[in-house]
Amino acid sequence: MSIINSLSPRAVAAPESGIVEVVNYARGREGLLPLWVGEGDLPTPDFINQAAMQALAAGETFYTWQRGIPELRQALSDYYFRHFGTRLPPEHFYVTGSGMQAIQIAVQAITSPGDELVYLSPAWPNIAAALEIAGARSVGVELQFEGGTWSVDLNRIEAAITPKTRGLFVNTPSNPTGWTATRKNLEDILALARKHDLWIMADEIYARYFYAGGRAPSFLDVMESGDKIIFVNSFSKNWSMTGWRVGWIVAPPETGQVLENLIQYSTSGVAQFMQKGAVAALNEGDAFVQTNIEKATRSRDILCDALIATNRVETLKPDGALYAFLKIDGVTDSRKAAIDIVDKTGVGLAPGTAFGPGGGLFLRACFLRDPGQVTIAAERLCDYILKL
């Protein structure tokens, strides 16, 4: 038996990320404009770094609270009151080692091997992979695409529910499509979950990136006490902290010991000095987040206006999140196209094949970058598209 064949079949079956494949192909090239991954071009701001460094210098390097330091859980409670208008006590919040770990823990809490979880597709590929690695089955329900916009069909979701279904994963605003649920969409999805006694795993990481102003509708706006909803989130996008790997869960306090145990048996908690940086992000970072939102708005308009003007790209400006999801005339293999585009233009895009059912004909571009860089990227892409 080979070494690979002696490993867990679930581990061996875990797919290579289609996004990372393209990144690894072209990483480090001179003149590259990397729009392939979901992060901006600014490093973490100094006020966050300083808080972490001061805690590190003060010796805050020991084991700490598995659920998160009290100061951070309080800061999360205050943040939700400011931006979501709801007062959730600190007992609702659990600090994780990234938004990805928040998803893994939520998957472990909700599903058992053989269970199913329905998600809206195209979707960030990690949710489906996390389910499959855990022994559950991911069931993608395609959003509808028409006239450059995306919409959800509740009947499709209900048709995918079986006796094995344990929950629904809903990411809004959506990575990669930019689809953003209306309050009515959320009410309907929640009613469906109640009808079938399902959990909702709500990924609202992009809630602040909502281009109609304010923030996007949230399940917090429509839920009631007793609803089975777990929110997963991350510090990555709002505060330019992708490399920190710090996230959080919002969940009913009754689940607290279960979630603490799952954290204990995975990472045993997030480093305290990193949590102190996260406290500074929440308490002092509203102006920085607003700067990121304004940059994303300008760059979204630059990129989408240029691409739409070619009359060769089927898309509209997304309502939320950080991505233009592009359907280019003549592109039938987005993985091959992503390689060709980076070779010929120096612009890195993510192939839609990485995002599951419904994504194969698309390419994703993250526009949370300096508008000047996005202008250059748009010019290169338009030149490439018009030569197809």
Image: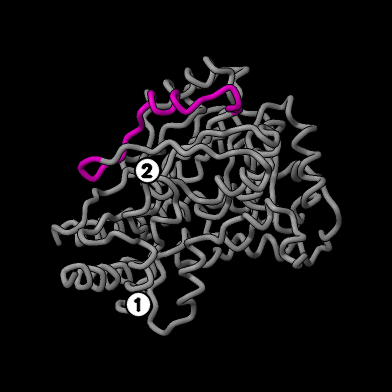
Res 14 quadrant in image? bottom right
Vertical position of residue 67 compared to residue 240: above or below: above
Left or right: residue 360 compared with residue 67: left
- The residue tagged with tag 2: helix, strand or loop? loop
- The residue tagged with tag 1: helix, strand or loop? loop
Left or right: residue 90 compared with residue 230: right
- Count up the numbered dots: 2
Q: Residue at x 48, y 80 (%)?
A: 28
Neighbour class for label 2 at 10 Å: few (<14), some, many (≥20)?
Answer: many
Vertical position of residue 255 compared to residue 285: above or below: above
Instruction: Give the position of the N terminus as an image quadrant.
Output: bottom right
Percent x, y for residue 250?
Answer: 63, 35
Q: Residue at x 13, y 57 (%)?
A: 311
Percent x, y for residue 37?
Answer: 46, 62
Return the residue at label 1. Answer: 346
Percent x, y for residue 44?
Answer: 55, 64
Q: Residue at x 60, y 17 (%)?
A: 225
- Of the two numbered discs 2 and 1 on the same chain, state the one appearing first in sequence: 2
Percent x, y for residue 284?
Answer: 56, 51
Return the residue at label 2. Answer: 210
In this rendering, which labeled residue sits more in front, label 2 or label 1?
1
Residue 199 seen in render:
yes
- The segment highlighted magenta reads 146-166
Query: What amino acid type should be assigned to the residue bearing mark 2?
Result: Phe
Mark seen at residue 83:
none
Query: What amino acid type should be assigned to the residue bearing mark 1?
Result: Gly
Vertical position of residue 350 compared to residue 158: above or below: below
Residue 87 seen in render:
no
